[in-house]
Amino acid sequence: MAADSTDKKDAESSGTKERERKRSRSRERKLSPTRKRNRSRERNRSKSAERDRRMKDKDRDKERDRDKDRERGRKDREAHRRDKDRSKRSRSLSPKSKDAKSKRERDIKTEEEEDEKKKKEKVQPLSLEELLAKKKAEEEAEAKPKFLSKAERESEALKRREQQTEERRRLLEDERKKRRMFQDMGRKMMEDPQERERRERRERMERENNGNEDDDGRQKLREEKDKSKELHAIKERYLGGLKKRRRTRHLNDRKFVFEWDASEDTSVDYNPIYKEKHHVQLYGRGFIAGIDLKQQKRDQSHFYGDLMERRRTLEEKEQEETRLKKMRKKEAKQRWDDRHWSQKKLDEMTDRDWRIFREDYSITTKGGKIPNPIRNWKEYSMPDHILEVIEKCGYKDPTPIQRQAIPIGLQNRDIIGVAETGSGKTAAFLIPLLVWITTLPKIDRIEDSDQGPYAVILAPTRELAQQIEEETIKFGKPLGIRTVAVIGGISREDQGFRLRMGCETVMFTATMPAAVERLARSYLRRPAVVYIGSAGKPHERVEQKVLLMSEGEKRKKLLEVLSHGFEPPIIIFVNQKKGCDYNACTLHGGKGQEQREFALSNLKAGAKDILVATDVAGRGIDIHDVSMVLNYDMAKNIEDYIHRIGRTGRAGKSGMALTFLTKEDSAVFYDLKQAILESPVSTCPPELTNHPEAQHKPGTILTKKRREETIFA
Ligand SMILES: Nc1ncnc2c1ncn2[C@@H]1O[C@H](COP(=O)(O)OP(=O)(O)OP(=O)(O)O)[C@@H](O)[C@H]1O
């Protein structure tokens, strides 16, 4: 009833709402046309939103209706039940209901009587036949398939499932317990023994404190232990006991000390597993993992070797033997041939060896059909008297230029020899010359000497000419060869000479500019050209230093350098004839020949420490052990510079070259920078490296790069 009333109320409220909505809509319709238009636009805009809202409202109404239906049904059912009760109550009062009741009571009574009868029957024991029949019936019943209802099947399955899960849970729990126990045990075992002791003691103490261990037996035991310890300590104190020293392990001590040798292990003999090892032999390229790979390879090669050996016929075996023999012989020969040239005799030298030989001495040749170089003086077929002189001079081994130039010279062939300063070029052209002269018949020589000299040696300076004369006399005198130097400044009458042209021409230098080489080639006949090392470069053992300064600073700097001390002799090169206050001798073109000779001999003899010279002393002058060359004025070209600094670091020794550089020398900046950069023992100062004049060779026209150009339109 209440539900009905609420439904009614709801219906009423929804009806009023609907009416109001209609009213408001009609009101809206009555509004002005402009407003109407606006409204319609608005309506259009919110059309979809409105539709959504209405749909939602509908859903909500439906839901509400459904709830109401459900509520109504429930209330109906309750009312029906109440009606039933009421009708029951009213029916009990009728005569019909009284009859039914008495009938029911009668039925119950008869049922009880039947039960009573059955019970009485059961009490009596069954006969054997009955028992057998019963058993048979039961068996038959059991044999018959039992049909269970779906509900029964489901309940049984549920029970089984519960049992299984219970069983699994129990097993898991047991396993977890076991694992925890093992973990605890493991942790205890892994523990540091000291730590374990400490932990056990702590646990014991805890137990004692908790009063768990207050039994007398344990207390007594502890007291006894303490007593025995005390006794032991007293004994040790008064009787002196053996105190075990704690072993300290040093950092570098070996951790494992095996007190037995591997050979003492006799288990191999006893254990049948080790006695009869099973070897796996794989065919192909495979290997067994975990076993020494090298050993496996060795075994495999043995295995295949044996296999091949077993399979070979006698003939094949012989063939293989001879093949191996041949191979071994060939290899041995190869090894023999591949020896270094120094381990070989002259006649064993191959072309390859000669090539290596030339590489070893940085010898480069041009001109075709160049004879092999000299390996050593004795080996080379030279007259004994020449060899004697060489020995006297103390030349143990030929220098690289001598090794290659002497054999060419002995073929009377024209040579251009380019080798660094102080590398023994003089002997390189003198020795073949003297050998050639000595090979001429003596009578001819005596007769021809009236005709003129056998050889003419040209030198750029008087000093050099005299130096070469000295060298030639040294070699030629023991051989009976006369030498004379023809130089300016000495009276012509004293120099008896006659020239004869048409003989061999040799040209030796430390620097060979391309223009000079072109000129030389036009005068020489099919010349053999010999270059040693990086020809035209300053000596690799001369350290080059450069100081940039003004002209006025030079003198001060010179005095500063000299005041630091130096090892005599040194040579100071100047471009102008200037004096110097030091213990010096001077050598330049303005001096008389005698003075020039005196100056040089003074320095060579050690009477003077410094030679101040112009380029006159720059080429060829050989003064032993010059420790430093100081270019007070820079040479006018790089060739002169190279010759100058070549006065130091001669005959395998090292030296130093110091150059004072001013901006007036800018013409050689570029070449000088290159020369210093190429020297392995020198460093170019940044002032020179970065100097604008040192960036390009003078005379080269620099073309501006396009991107650097500024175009003004
Ligand atoms: N085989 C040699 N063994 C030892 N010393 C030698 C040998 N040959 C030459 N010398 C010595 O080396 C020094 C330099 O020799 P030499 O004057 O011939 O050199 P150079 O190449 O002509 O030098 P430069 O280019 O300056 O004229 C000399 O003192 C000389 O005695």
Image: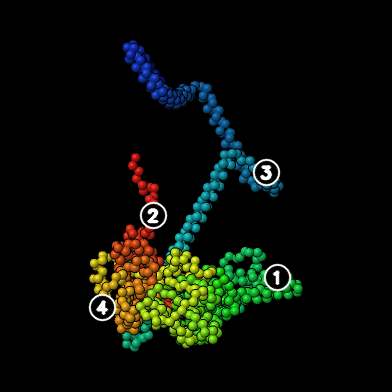
Q: Amino acid at mark 1?
A: Met
Which quarter of the image is occupied by the N terminus? top left
Do callouts 2 and 3 mark residues in contact (Cβ within 8 Å)?
no
Q: On the picture, is 170 further left or further right than 314?
A: left
Q: Amino acid at mark 4?
A: Tyr
Q: Position of residue 652 (x, y in %)?
A: 42, 77
Q: Nearer the viewer, mark 1 or mark 3?
A: 1
- For image coordinates 39% across by 19% down, the residue present is 44
Q: Which residue bears the numbered disc 1?
A: 308
Between 245 and 73, the residue placed more toward the observer is: 245
- For image coordinates 56% across by 33% down, the residue present is 108
Q: Amino acid at mark 3?
A: Lys
The quarter of the rendering in which ligand 1 is drawn is bottom left
Q: Which residue bears the numbered disc 2?
A: 701
Q: Nearer the viewer, mark 3 or mark 4?
A: 4
Q: Nearer the viewer, mark 1 or mark 4?
A: 4
> Considering only order in the chain, which callout, 1 or 2, is on the residue closer to the N terminus?
1
Residue 252 seen in the figure: no
Inter-mark Cα distance, 3 to 4: 144 Å
* Residue 582 disc label: 4
Ligand 1 within 8 Å of disc 3? The answer is no
Judged from the image, the secondary structure of the residue bearing numbered disc 3 is loop
Q: Which residue bears the numbered disc 3?
A: 144
Ligand 1 within 8 Å of disc 2? The answer is no
Inter-mark Cα distance, 1 to 4: 90 Å
